Image (cartoon, grey):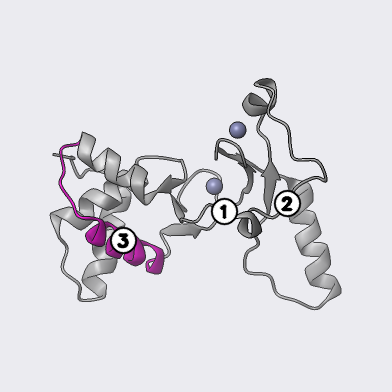
């Protein structure tokens, strides 16, 4: 059994209550898994972690709960062009961050850059645009993969979506 003790799970339960949706042990267990990591989890990984906590929850319930978590704005959905989505909660200490995505091993590294923030503000001001959020994803090879001798295909980086 996964113990439901994360304060953010309570925020999610409150959201469910406000929406008139049932608060179930299964939904709370999925939320608990997502909130207890700072990573970018796939549905497979979430299912694995639930199983480690000996929680038997069907994929449909996991998908439905993730959908609700995204709607509640507590969780962000990412599509890194891998053919599946990844989920990360938005209550980390780094609410604004960018992503480095390794095309070889699929690792996701986060970084924060004041310069990127400055570009957002400058461009927005130039176009009279009110920015709400932005997303920067850099695809390539992580340090480990490069050390292991993996090379990018000649001709540089191809769009991973096109190669699927
Ligand atoms: Zn890698
Ligand atoms: Zn992230």
Assess whether residue 60 is covered by the magenta stretch.
Answer: yes
Magenta stretch, main secondary structure class: helix
The tag earlier along the polypeptide, 2 or 1, is 1
Residue 138 left/right relative to 6: right
- Write the residue at 64% across / 53% down: 160
Give the quarter of the image for residue 63: bottom left
From the image, tell me which residue sits under label 3: 63
Q: Nearer the viewer, residue 117 or 162?
A: 162
Q: Going by the picture, which residue comes out furthest to the right?
A: 126
Contact, mark 2 vs mark 1 (Cβ under 8 Å)? no
Q: Position of residue 85 (x, y in %)?
A: 46, 56
Tell me the quarter of the image containing the N terminus.
Answer: top left
Q: Which mark is residue 80?
A: 1
Determine whether 152 is above or below 14 in the image. Answer: above
The boundaries of the magenta stretch are: 53-72
Tell me the quarter of the image containing the C terminus.
Answer: bottom right
Local secondary structure at mark 2: loop
Local secondary structure at mark 3: helix
Q: Position of residue 120 (x, y in %)?
A: 76, 61
Which one is closest to the eye, mark 2 or mark 1? 2
State the CA–CA distance, disc 2 to disc 3. 30 Å
Q: Residues within 10 Å of mark 2 (few under 14, many from 20)?
A: some
The tag earlier along the polypeptide, 3 or 1, is 3
- Write the residue at 22% across / 53% down: 28
State the CA–CA distance, disc 3 to disc 1. 18 Å
Q: Residues within 10 Å of mark 3 (few under 14, many from 20)?
A: few
Residue 85 left/right relative to 64: right
Q: Nearer the viewer, residue 148 or 74?
A: 148
């Amino acid at each position: 059994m996964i113990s439901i003790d994360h304060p953010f799970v309570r925020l999610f339960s409150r959201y469910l209550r406000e929406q008139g949706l049932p608060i179930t042990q299964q939904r709370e267990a999925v939320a608990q898994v997502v909130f207890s990591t700072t990573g970018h989890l796939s549905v497979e990984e979430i299912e694995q972690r639930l199983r480690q906590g000996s929680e038997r929850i069907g994929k449909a319930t996991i998908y439905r709960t993730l959908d609700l978590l995204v709607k509640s704005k507590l969780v962000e959905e990412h599509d890194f062009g891998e053919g599946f989505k990844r989920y990360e909660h938005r209550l980390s200490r780094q609410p604004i961050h960018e992503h480095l995505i390794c095309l070889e091993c699929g690792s996701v590294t986060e970084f924060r850059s004041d310069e990127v923030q400055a570009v957002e503000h400058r461009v927005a001001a130039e176009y009279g645009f009110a920015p709400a959020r932005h997303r920067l994803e850099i695809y390539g090879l992580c340090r480990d993969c490069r050390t292991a001798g993996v090379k990018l295909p000649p001709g540089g980086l191809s769009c991973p979506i096109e190669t699927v």
